[in-house]
Image (cartoon, rainbow, N blue to C red):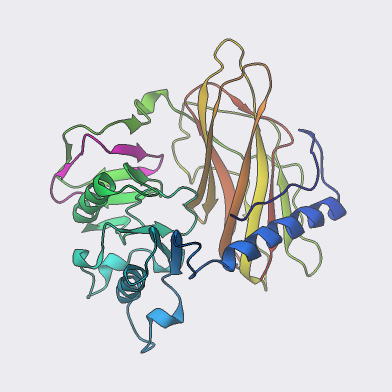
Amino acid sequence: MAQYNRQSTFLPDEVLTAEQLEDEFNAIQAAINDIDSRVGSVEGGLIIVYNAADPAFSPLGGESFAARVANAIQAALAVDAKTRVVWVPKFMWGYSADHDFNLAMFDPSVLVVREGSLKPWYDPVAYGVDLTGTRKADDIIQLCINHAAQATGPGSRVVAFTVPGDYMLDNDVTHNSGVGIIVLPGVNFTGDSEFVGSPAWKYPPDPETVLYAQVRRTTHQSFDGNVPVGVVQWEQVDLDPQGMADLNADATKLTVPEGFSGIAKIGGVLNISADSLDPEAHIQAFVVKNGGSIALSEFTTMDGDDDHSVAIDVLTAFEEGDQFWVTVVSDRQRHVRAGSRMFFHQIA
């Protein structure tokens, strides 16, 4: 598999030079190119990945997003591979609103993943769910739970609500005792119905114990001439249990300057404080684009003597005026240390 090999060892408070930054992005680009070369091909009969936005899945040029996803799923089913994946970019989200959307288009042997998802969970957004609370979401959520219970490949037995929005439950959704559920900040279940039964596990177990923080203080932000390379570096920020359960709360935003659009690499490092008396904490860092989470990095701290670092690493489309920021969630009192940073760099 493709691997990003860090070119330097960075200290917690170190500010990178332009040369160091370029070396890192060149290494990241090499890893991306390796990944891109694998899309649409079978590796040793193990895995195939199709991009639902590929023009091959819109032969007439006017197919709906739902039809394109359906075509990609059928193409994946036609290939002899152990794992089949269809990737849905952000501009196609919400395709359940298309007139030809049908739950029958999905197959449990093909995992559908969304742009920005760093883990192959069953995410209803990848399956076209509406995030505005105007169309029912319960049927798609139930399908995700049912498919997760059947699956044996990546994403099996986990359904994750990782994108903020309003998910309308027009009918009750039945948990599966073998499937875990993740519900992250900003996810709201609306409507007159509810979840029934018990999942295998749920995170967070008690929302009142979760601490939130927007990484909202900056010591440096700049774009270098005609090359859109942005850097945000944060001072220490405390994780706060009060009033920070919203991915859209006040945060340091990195804004794409006028005249730029394309594909960008967002990378960075979050340094999280340690606690020798309470060493285990579950940390989640969301990369947010214009108010919606597009990526999630997570880890569990176990060593109480040293600070912990979590990498941010995501590829996304962008255009001028787009804003990117980071939200951190923890189930224990922690701090985002000074020297944590986010980089934005156009690669195409």
Residue at image location 37% in from the left, 70% down from the top: 79
Residue at image location 27% in from the left, 73% down from the top: 98
View extreme (bottom): residue: 60
Q: Say above or below: 141 vs 106.
A: above
View extreme (front): residue: 44
Q: Say above or below: 32 vs 156.
A: below
| Image side of residue 271 versus residue 240, left or right | right
Q: Position of residue 146 (x, y in %)?
A: 21, 48
Which quadrant does the C terminus fall into? bottom right
| Image side of residue 178 versus residue 325, left or right | left
The chief SS type of the magenta part is: loop
Q: Position of residue 183 (x, y in %)?
A: 35, 39
Q: Quadrant of residue 299?
A: top right
Q: Quadrant of residue 207?
A: top left
Q: Say above or below: 121 vs 43.
A: above
Is residue 103 in the magenta section? no
Q: Quadrant of residue 185?
A: top left
Residue 266 visible: yes
The magenta segment:
168-187
Q: Position of residue 51 (x, y in %)?
A: 45, 69
Residue at image location 68% in from the left, 67% down from the top: 347
| Badge count | 0
Which quadrant does the N terminus fall into? bottom right
| Image side of residue 298 versus residue 81, left or right | right
